[in-house]
Amino acid sequence: MSTELYLAFGKNSVLLGMELCKLMASPNCNASLIISSALSHLVPATFRQNTMTPVLEIPAQAAGTEPVSVDVMKRSLECYLTIRRSNEPGAVGAIVDVGLLRSMRWLVDVFYHNHIPITGFFTSSAFSTVMDYDASTQDDKSVGLLGCLPGWGFAGVGPKVIGLSGPGDHPPWMGFTKKFMGVMINTVDDLERPYVEDLAKKLKLRVWPVGPLLPREYFSLVGTAVRSSNEGEASVIDWLDSRPRRSVLFVSSVDLTAEEYPLLVDALKASTHYFIWVVRPGGYYPEVDDSVREKGLITSEMVPNCMVLNHPSTAAFLSNCSWEPLMEAIGLGVPILAWPKTSDQLYNAKLVVKRLKVGYCVCDKFSHMVNGLVTVKGMGKGIDALMGDKYMEGRAADLGARFSWGFPQSSRDALVRFKDDLALL
């Protein structure tokens, strides 16, 4: 008898959901992707053609039309569940991105009332999830303005500043954990085992680390020569080919304030290192003089991060520390220059710098980064420190070697354990 899985993912996690569906699907397991119809354009035809990964689009408001009621959305899902379960599957289960719980909390209610075991899915690191949980369960007296745990030093950074939970301010997902059979996290056991175990202990739930949920093309790049038939991508690769090995700082789509972008330009200008800066089309485009262009490439070509990170000329990655780009860099053995701004980025930066020790920060104090106190001089020190640190380069390479055989075996094993646990319910 086959297993029926229902995976509900939101705007910022649809690609993760598709990768998880592909990993879950097999001749005896169907993995349905459940999304809002407003996200239909994000799902390619090649994914839809796989009969083991059907797609349900929940009706959403179209331009110029009346809002779709929750009752209509619920009926759409309930009808789909009835049809899919008509074949009497051997086991059923739902995986729900916890990021949906603010706007589509009714998803949990539908699955729960249909007696379908629910697993919460976290797109963030296990460490940031634990930190968010711990900060929210402390009282004002013990946490004050730190919003942190002992030994992780966030002095001067209030939880409201960085967009995380404060004392007594529970994250949205915490109210649903009693309805979860467990949680999945987009991480790797080798990277975060202490925090995976800590989260399981605190939530009193099973935790399955199943990442990194990156496109399969990513793993095919590891250890291979970088080439592309796309004209824009090819021009970027040609520029990298002309630079010495491990000499280029990669800057990609960083989110900064209007005041901070010029600081980055000035720091790159003052630096002696090569750089490549991929900017978002229509976003901030730095005005630079010829002296900067001689050692740097600024482009709006949407080159995949992994293509640049995998190039032998790339020495380091300047990142806001969102989890998925960090996982790409870690898996390809590239050290990280951290400039976190909000949300879980600050915790991810701490994980990279203090725990994994594969990166530096753009300045000495974390509070300066989120409070707008980064200086050109401080940023220059961070760039020079990282680009010249052979020990850090070696640590990053050793960590990346764990991904050299493709999708981690520990994560494959976690997916098998999840299915086995589901079958026992």
Image (cartoon, helix red, strand yellow):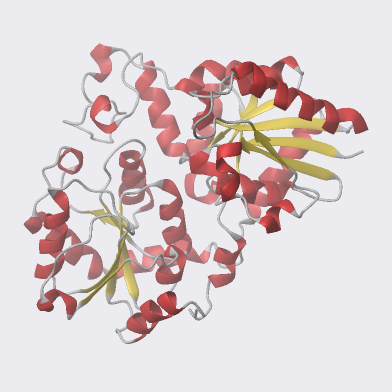
Above/below status of 33 relative to 320: above
Q: The C terminus is located in which quarter? A: top right
Q: Nearer the viewer, residue 314 or 146?
A: 314
Name the residue at 67% across, 26% down: 118
Name the residue at 74% across, 47% down: 53
Q: Return the x and y of residue 29 as percentages of the image width and height.
A: 81, 44
Q: Nearer the viewer, residue 79 or 123?
A: 79
Q: Return the x and y of residue 76 as percentages of the image width and height.
A: 71, 26
Q: Residue furthest bottom?
A: 242
Left or right: where 224 falls relative to 395: right
Q: Nearer the viewer, residue 83 or 20?
A: 83
Q: Quadrant of residue 243?
A: bottom left
Residue 14 visible from this viewpoint: yes
Q: Return the x and y of residue 148 as percentages of the image width and height.
A: 30, 28
Name the residue at 48% across, 39% down: 194
Above/below status of 158 relative to 322: above
Above/below status of 314 relative to 17: below
